[in-house]
Amino acid sequence: MKIYTVRINTQIEKHIFDELLSLTSKEEQERIGRFRKFEDALRGLTSNILLRYIIASSLGRKNNCIYFSKSEYGKPYIAGNENFHFNLSHSGDWVVCAVDNMPVGIDVEKIHDVDLNLSARFFSEEEHSYLITLDEKERREAFFELWTLKESYIKADGRGLSIPLNSFSFTIIGKSITFKTTNQLKECYFKQYEINNSYKLAVCALNSGFPESLTDISFEELYKLANVHLL
């Protein structure tokens, strides 16, 4: 398993954005072009280029031969590569990608103020009851720890938000994560990583072989790698 992180650079020159965009498919170019905000378009583009670099360098596949299929729930995969699984997430300044030989899910979220009505509506009773005991700062931190764990689980499962978020529950004590669920996927493992004081990051995998550290690639380095592996 490897977990890649890229911090986007909103100060890039237009020709760099255009060069990277040309390395994506026409469908992806159209999707990225529909974003109204440049930051959103850049996150989408960075996610795509990072994934294409990982596939090209890991599977030895030429960029123009990288095609994505989607499951019935919309999760993308590379057809014919049963031992290659990936999952992407992005928020704020960060794009992250987890890769493994079994299904994997990853989520990164920027911490911000939250409405407790969200946890009352979407979280388990135990999780919501825990959150209301905390002060405001602790509550924000704990909310996004739980949220990223939940997102990573439903993404690893592959069915996304068709799985009710209150059908499973987490208890976090220090670095220990206790998981309870009524869903079919029970044999899975979780790990949280420190990426930035303003963000939370969690990974769910079907095996426990988590890397000790993240593979961080600067945006400038990703641009150079794209020119080597994707042209």
Image (cartoon, rainbow, N blue to C red):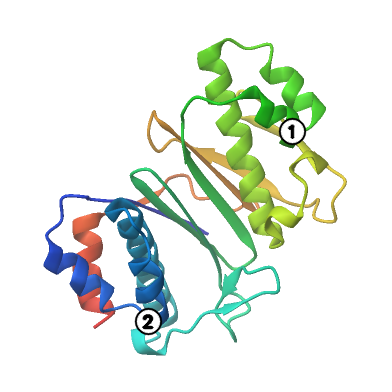
Q: Eyeballing the image, is 23 above or below 159?
A: below
Q: Report the residue at 37% width, 47% height from top.
A: 94
| Mark 1 vs mark 2: in front | 1
Q: Which residue is mark 2?
A: 25
Q: Which residue is mark 1?
A: 121
User: Callout 1: helix, strand or loop?
Assistant: helix
**89 or 82, which is in the foreground?**
89
Q: Position of residue 69 (x, y in %)?
A: 57, 80
Q: Amino acid at mark 1?
A: Arg
Q: Amino acid at mark 2?
A: Ser
> Quick one: label 1, few (<14), some, or many (20+) residues within 10 Å?
few
Q: Position of residue 220 (x, y in %)?
A: 18, 58
Q: CA distance from mark 1 to mark 2?
A: 39 Å
Q: Position of residue 223 (x, y in %)?
A: 21, 65
Q: Eyeballing the image, is 29 above or below 88?
A: below
Q: Which mark is residue 205?
A: none
Q: Quadrant of residue 190?
A: top right
Q: Eyeballing the image, is 211 above or below 142?
A: below
